[in-house]
Image: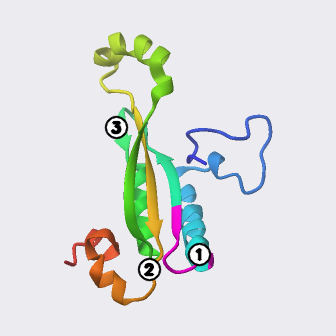
Amino acid sequence: PYANIISYTKSKKIEGDLSQLPLKDYLTEMRKVAEESFRVLKPNKICAILIGDTRKHKHYVPIALFILQIFLDVGFVLKEDIIKLQWNMKATKKFWNPKKKEHDFYLIAHEHIFVFRKPESQKEYKKYKYSSKVWMNGQI
């Protein structure tokens, strides 16, 4: 689900479909996803999420960074941030490249695959402080 970016239910509304929500509501629901994922995941196991960004009024909206913060807030530590290039954009790029100056922004050509790990204990947060909520809040 992509916060009203990619609709997964075009023909009819489905209850609980996150792809139809405005960004604020989407982030609220994704916090629930992160909390439940953290609750059910065994210690030292992995949770991964693929997420992209968008634009609004010709300005970048870093949805991936909002999601990263949410998952760190609930207790995960970031193991990897894999940048996935959008290879299927060949036709789009051919069409867009001559127009990017006119429209004053570039296409977003990547997504993030965040790989999170649930720590085994509270002690691990200190060990991985640069990959956890502590670092993101500027409390080093």
Label 3 amino acid? His
Residue type indicated by callout 1: Leu
Q: Residue at x 56, y 56 (%)?
A: 26
Q: Is residue 45 above or below residue 84?
A: below
The disc at residue 59 is 3
Indicate the quadrant where residue 100 lies.
Answer: top left
The mark nearer the N terminus, 3 or 2, is 3
Seen from the viewer's position, the closer of residues 7 and 123 is 123
Q: Earlier in the sequence, mark 1 or mark 2?
A: 1
Residue at the left extreme, as displayed: 140
Q: Residue at x 38, y 64 (%)?
A: 79
Q: Main secondary structure of the magenta part?
A: loop
Q: What label sits on residue 41 in the rendered view? A: 1
Q: Which residues are magenta?
A: 40-47
Element type at marker 3?
strand
Mark 2, residue position? 119
Q: Does residue 70 belong to the magenta stretch?
A: no
Where disc 1 sits, the SS reads loop
